[in-house]
Image: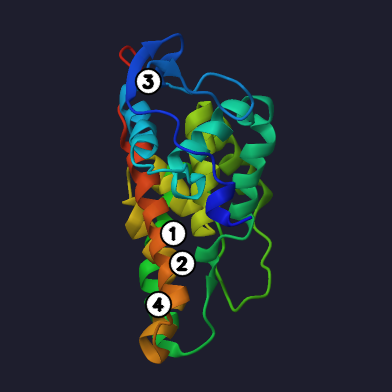
Amino acid sequence: MTETAARPSRFYKAVTVQAADGGFAVRLDGRGAKTPGGAPLVAPTRALAALIAAEWDAQADTIDFSRMPATRLAFTAIDRTPRHRTAVAAEVAAYAGSDVLCYLAEHPSALAAQEAAAWEPWLAWAATTLEVTLRPSIGIAHAAQPPESLARAQAHAEAMDDFGLTALAFAAGLYGSAVLALAVARGALDAVEAYELSRLDETFQQERWGVDPEAAARTHALRTEAAMVGRWFSTPLPAGES
């Protein structure tokens, strides 16, 4: 069976967003879409529901969930995160414990200098704004971070609602950095810029040795997911929230 044949066929024509209990529902030909767990596909804001709905509307003859990152994230926010909030927040803290911003290259010196110039301001931002102080080091050997900083990173994550926490954990994994993810979540940093900051080493090597098509396709896909995260966090809160 081919990958295309394994995908479900597109069984609907129209995709709409409608107010529903708990927020705004994605509807397919007027019927509410469901998560894999059988729950209604409902987002807390109309803008977020529209972001998800646009992915359903963009499908052709078959439904390719690999090209629907916002939908997958919503499934997780609805089916998994509410029951595992502490574990999801702990994932964010774990990324803080091995944050990519804390591992400066040993060589070449040009890359080390580039990383220091680009990353140190965001480590300073985390220390000042979030009281999450992380210690940078040289090389790839693991450097233990202050437990109190990891606890604060987890607390910041747990303070978010289910949809925000889910996206934060996703962004931390995408970037390999809790600091960059928290900066994007708080509107301090553009999501695609954060992705570029997270891959300075890779970019440096590609500029020296070139880019093969497979690596270019992977980078494009991850950059697209970063852009989706940016739109996810930029959606306005429901009326009455702050």
Q: Closer to the observer: label 2 or label 3?
A: 3
Q: Are marks 3 and 4 in contact (CB under 8 Å)?
A: no
Mark toward the start of the polypeptide (3 vs 4): 3
At label 3, the amino acid type is Asp
The answer to whether one can see residue 237 in this image is: no
Image spot of residue 38 (x, y percent): 61, 22
Image spot of residue 214 (x, y percent): 47, 75
Which numbered circle lies on residue 222?
Answer: 1
Q: Are marks 1 and 2 in contact (CB under 8 Å)?
A: yes
Mark toward the start of the polypeptide (1 vs 4): 4
Q: How many numbered dots are placed on residues in this image?
A: 4
The residue beneath circle 2 is 218
Image spot of residue 71 (x, y percent): 47, 36
At label 2, the amino acid type is Arg
Kindly state the secondary structure of the residue where label 1 is placed.
helix
Closer to us: 28 or 241? 28
Identified at 31% across, 32% down, the residue is 235
Identified at 40% across, 57% down, the residue is 122
The residue beneath circle 4 is 203
Kindly state the secondary structure of the residue where label 4 is placed.
helix
Q: CA distance from mark 3 to mark 4?
A: 44 Å
Kindly state the secondary structure of the residue where label 2 is placed.
helix
